[in-house]
Image (spheres, rainbow, N blue to C red):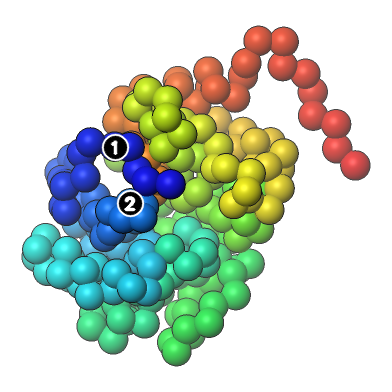
Amino acid sequence: MTDRSDTCRPVTEISEGVYDLTLTREPARYRAYLFDWDIPTLVDCGPAEASDTLLDRIATCDVAPERLILTHADHDHVGGFDEVVDRYDPTTWVPEQSCLETEHDPDRRYGHEDQLEPFTAVHVPGHTDDNYALVAPEHNLAIMGDALIGADWRGLPAGYFVLVEGVYSDDLRAAERNAERLQDYAFDVGLVFHGSSVLEDAREKLDAYLDFPNKGDWVTD
């Protein structure tokens, strides 16, 4: 599957100090995000084969990350971990559920609702057990991890969310149920790793997606 987004520039400054780093375009678009905020932070680090590209993209931004946060440990999010640590020696934050096969051990582990200022970590298992979103209310922004992706990844109009495909998810039912946790937070921008990000009215669009007509109560075991 290829990314249908038509905005695959190598580095895009989405808003002041928020950089979307495109690492590959074929066979799919893989991303990382770099934040030039109080603590310069890299979120995820792409697949291993794009490690050199990741370092080039970071250098283009002229921002040295002091912190690396993983949303989860899928190959397309963790591949450049060792290379980033070797180059920048950031403090590394990894979900408490993640199992890493990296040369460097993580410095810190985080869990649900832990504060990684300015982010709040929101555990959204389903795609994987260790999947997290990161919400920064004071910046009106959320990084969705792989809780949700851009609708255009699945051939629908850009500017909306859909769930990650079932073929790539451990438990699609759990993924949808746990995505409701994000409705406890306010944000206008929702950054995704696959497809196009939702750059306006993201929370309202998430509500419309999750709170569909005639929605019943979840039946749990």
In the displayed structure image, the side of residue 109 where residue 40 appears, left or right: left
Residue sitting at x 24%, y 50%: 20
Distance of mark 1 from mark 2, alpha carbons? 9 Å
In the displayed structure image, the side of residue 120 where residue 211 appears, left or right: right
Residue 6's spot in the image, x, y percent? 23, 36
The answer to whether any part of residue 17 appears in the image is no
The answer to whether any part of residue 14 appears in the image is yes
Residue closer to the observer: 92 or 81: 81
For the image, the number of numbered tags is 2
Check whether the beta carbons of the residues at disc 1 and disc 2 lie within 8 A of each other: yes
Give the vertical position of 7 relative to 101 (above or below).
Answer: above
Looking at the picture, which amino acid does disc 1 mark? Ser
Residue closer to the observer: 26 or 221: 26
**Residue found farthest to the top:** 213
Residue closer to the observer: 82 or 88: 82
Residue 89's spot in the image, x, y percent? 28, 82
Neighbor class of circle 2 (other Cα within 10 Å; few <14, some 14-19, many 20+) is many
Q: Quadrant of the C terminus?
A: top right
**On the image, numbered disc 1 is attached to which residue?**
5
Quarter of the rendering containing residue 174: top right
Residue 22's spot in the image, x, y percent? 24, 54
Residue sitting at x 37%, y 40%: 195
Task: Give the mark nearest the N terminus, 1 or 2.
Answer: 1
**On the image, numbered disc 2 is attached to which residue?**
29
Q: Which mark is residue 119?
A: none
At mark 1, the secondary structure is loop
Residue sitting at x 60%, y 60%: 130
Looking at the picture, which amino acid does disc 2 mark? Arg
At mark 2, the secondary structure is loop
In the displayed structure image, the side of residue 179 where residue 177 appears, left or right: right
Residue 152's spot in the image, x, y percent? 39, 32
